[in-house]
Image (cartoon, rainbow, N blue to C red):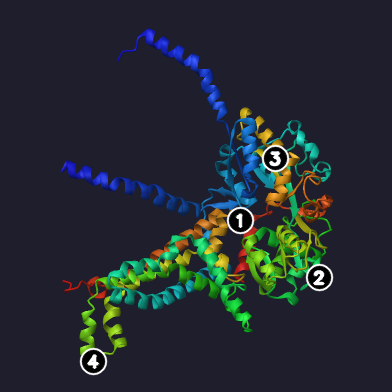
Amino acid sequence: MKNNRLFFWVLTGPGTAFLLLFLILPLMSIVVFSFWRTESYHLYADWNLDNYRVLATNPSYVTFLLRSLFMASVVSFVSLVVAWPVAFFITRYGGQFKIILLLLTSTPFLTGEILRVTAMQQILGPIGLINMALTTFGFDPVTALMYSKTATAIGLIYLWLPFMVLAIHLSLLNFDFELLQVAKVNGARPLRAFWEVTWPLNRAGSAIGVVLVFIPTLASSITSKFLGGPNGALFGNILAHQFGSTGTWALGSAMGVVLFVISLLVLYIVWKSIGDLNRSGITIKGGAE
Amino acid sequence: MTITRRKLMQGAGAIALTSPFIRNAQAATLELRWLGWEHYNVASIVHGFEKEYGVKVSSGFFDGNSEAYNKLKTGGTTDYDLVMADGFWPRLYGKQGLTQPVDYGQLDNMQYVFDDFKAPNYMLLQEEGGTNMIAAPNCWGGYGLTVNLDKIAPEDADSLSVLFNPKYAGHVSTSARFEENIALAGILAANTLGTKDGPRPDGKPFNPYVLTDAELEEAKKLLIKQKSLLLTRWNDEDTLERLLRAQAVWVSPEWSGIYRRIAFDKMDGKSDLNMQHVLRPREGGLGWVDTWAITSGVDSERMELAHKWINWRLKPENMAIIATDVGWSPTVDVRKLIPERYVKTMFLNETGAIKGLYQFDAPSSPEKWERVWSEVEAA
């Protein structure tokens, strides 16, 4: 009994200490700072709710938050639509190459985020591949691709798509594809079979994919910084600004807390939407209990 | 094991005998740590210093003065012996007790510095209202306009209003630095409101980093209007250079390095672009002299070394490397050591221009400026 307890602490102790020290403690300090005040780069421990009042009432910060929520929704939805066929193809027809195909979709992750975003600039910008090709052939360049919210969305989808593919693939790995044959025998066309069999039984994979794309998009700043143009600042950009050049840490901390609370809310909604795991995604070939 | 008196004496004797060597070993590994802009970390200059004085040099980097200031405020004065700062920032460091006076008596190479960067011509290296020198100069420059004269009318080229002119919609760019965007718009706003040359609330001459509420409001309006004209706000010089070369951008404020590279290409017959750099637009412009300051955490042993480092950096041969290899204009007269085309494009025959440029500074109220910038970004 005593040995078991010791074994438990040896196994969980380092991880718990790490999380406490590097996750919980910084989060706590952010929460504390959010109730303080900054003035000319100084942080004063004057407890107040002013930062939250500013965030709730100043239209600029509300705009940034709405922009980010909208961007995260669009990026998650498009990623979901694009990732499904890819994940389906890899799982259903990938055979012995499944892992290799999956790894190939993650190849961009072998480089840093800034490099990937810079590469996107070379494709989407006014002197990028697409617009240069268009102008070479006498067409007008596509202005929507030049330093715009559309360019940011494309960049973010490119960044997070592999997470969505992975989540759906992992869900599909446990899916019994023979169910689709049964649906077909019973007269269902492929689209109907997808909607009534594949989709509901893999809802958990889609939901986890949405979480993995939605939350990082909500907090993202680098992609919009490089691709977004003058009208593309997101909540993450303004948050990063508070801790960088403006030195308004207290307001930045409050923004961080707001972002954290929204992320928790998204997790809760997704968790609720999944419902009964056995019936909505965690399917086991041969039947779940 | 028992420790006898004899063993104790033997141990003490051994320590006494070896201690001079221990001290020497410590001296040999004395480390000088500086915090500055990464481009100034030139290997040949650093290695030369290490070899000359038998010490080790390490460095930390930042992207802007406010970032460096925050680093020093959060314990950086014990982590770094020297810090780089430009414009009014050395005075702020001094006032906050983050740096300590620099002894110009130990800087022989100050004799090579242009008079335009010494008192009484340039006073920001001296403490406000005092006689102590608080920093030594390094490089200087403006934040002027690089203009494509094939696209921009000559009568518009030397005015800040070119950045707000609807005629050039879609081909204007500015950097993402919020302080300089507001300061440039502030100069134009003060001109429009007629407040630039009048008496100021603080009794000091006009400073675009200390704007009145009315000027700040006008600057905000200008910046919001400007958004529809901008192609992008650049975050790195490479991006701006590519956009200028491809003629996607016709005008942008920049440090003049891009202008110089394009001008060199033209001289070498590699480019046809007709570029001009306006160091001081007619309404006024921004400028900077970056400096070396010694942090308050430096002890007497490192103090001497810190002065040697500054003196080493001021050596004309080292400053010539900064000019040609790094691309910033030195405050030291290196005109005889570098090719003429560098002298011309680095404005080394026009160092007096620094007097007419408003020096980089901290915003008078970072909170107020942050709010203005957020409103501009959200509009």
Q: Are marks 2 and 3 in contact (CB under 8 Å)?
A: no
Residue bearing the label numbered 2: B156
**Is disc 1 surrounded by few (<14), some (14 to 19) or many (20+) residues within 10 Å?**
many
* Subunit that carries the residue with mark 3: B
Labels 2, 3: front one: 3
Labels 2, 1: front one: 2
Pick out the residue farthest to the bottom. Answer: A187
Check disc 2 and give the amino acid type: Asp
Q: Position of residue B77 (x, y in %)?
A: 59, 39
Q: Are marks 1 and 3 in contact (CB under 8 Å)?
A: no
Q: Residue at x 37, y 71 (%)?
A: A165
Q: Residue at x 18, y 42 (%)?
A: A3
* Subunit that carries the residue with mark 1: A
Check disc 1 and give the amino acid type: Thr
Labels 1, 3: front one: 3
Labels 3, 4: front one: 3
Check disc 3 and give the amino acid type: Arg
Q: Position of residue B10 (x, y in %)?
A: 41, 11
Rounded to the nearest whole Å, what is the CA distance between mark 1 and mark 3? 31 Å
Rounded to the nearest whole Å, what is the CA distance between mark 2 and mark 3? 39 Å
**Residue B90 sits above or below residue B64 on the image:** above
* Subunit that carries the residue with mark 2: B
Q: Which label number is shown at residue B313?
A: 3
Residue bearing the label numbered 1: A246
Rounded to the nearest whole Å, what is the CA distance between mark 3 and mark 4? 82 Å
Tell me the quarter of the image containing the N terminus of chain B: top left
